[in-house]
Image (cartoon, grey):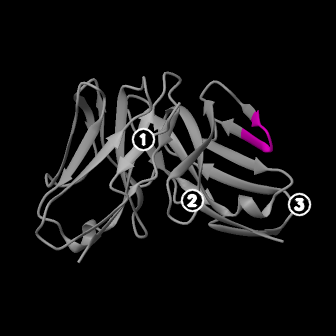
Amino acid sequence: SQQGEEDPQALSIQEGENATMNCSYKTSINNLQWYRQNSGRGLVHLILIRSNEREKHSGRLRVTLDTSKKSSSLLITASRAADTASYFCATDVQGAQKLVFGQGTRLTINP
Amino acid sequence: KAGVTQTPRYLIKTRGQQVTLSCSPISGHRSVSWYQQTPGQGLQFLFEYFSETQRNKGNFPGRFSGRQFSNSRSEMNVSTLELGDSALYLCASRSGYNEQFFGPGTRLTVL
């Protein structure tokens, strides 16, 4: 079963706009990782945020983590058509040696 | 450094057959995990290996099995294939910083 929920399930924006995706989870975690997937291909690792971190940046990506609310958000700034993909959050569950995935957000960037 | 490789990329089998999928992790990574992705169930954890030992197993029937070799390469086997086993099977290797990097996947179709 899925660890948590991602919101929204689908998001369509214009190129150049910012996209925000949210992820909630249920159990204690070591870290939370975000991935991108294009059309059923492999998952591309975007960023990892540890449980003791609150915010992390990588290029146009900004990730926040609120462990008290068991939630995370991924912000993509200045979106491009190439950002069109599905985005997944995955929690590295404490003591489990596995990632538990949300159901993903389908992001469409319109030119 | 080469990424995670998986072979074969595509596979078509018939019900009742068995299949073996292979995964080579990133050089130096000793942990390998397997995940199944389907439209209905999303991404689900199958098992995780570290130094040839299975450390965790997901909620899948015994028809799903795996192993890891001394060079960290891993194989998973599915016996007595069912239609519902059609999926994208993804392998991931874990870095020393706990980032998990995925391969391109093996698309299994069971007819």
Asked whether the residues under the numbered discs 1 and 3 touch, taking CB atoms below 8 Å apart as contact, a structural biologist would say no
User: On the image, numbered disc 2 is attached to which residue?
Assistant: A104
Name the magenta segment's main secondary structure. strand
Q: Which chain contains the residue that carries disc 1? A: B
Q: Which chain contains the residue that carries disc 2? A: A
Of residues A4 and A16, which is closer to you in this image?
A: A16
How would you rate the neighbour count of disc 3 (Cα within 10 Å): few for under 14, some for 14-19, many for 20 or more? some
Q: Which chain contains the residue that carries disc 3? A: A
Q: Where does the magenta region start and end?
A: A57-63
Query: Residue A89: where, in percent of width, then height?
Result: 57, 48
Total number of numbered discs in the rendering: 3
In this rendering, the answer to whether B39 lies above or below B103 is below
- Calculate the distance from the C-alpha at mark 2 to the C-alpha at mark 1: 18 Å
How would you rate the neighbour count of disc 1 (Cα within 10 Å): few for under 14, some for 14-19, many for 20 or more? many
Of residues B55 and A28, which is closer to you in this image?
A: B55
Do the residues at discs 1 and 3 belong to one chain? no
Q: Amino acid at mark 1?
A: Ala
Q: Can residue A27 be spotted in the picture?
A: no
Q: Residue at x 23, y 78 (%)?
A: B111
User: On the image, numbered disc 1 is attached to which residue?
Assistant: B92
Q: Amino acid at mark 3?
A: Gly
- Indicate which disc residue A16 carries: 3
Label whose residue precedes the other's in the sequence (2 or 3): 3
Q: Amino acid at mark 2?
A: Gly
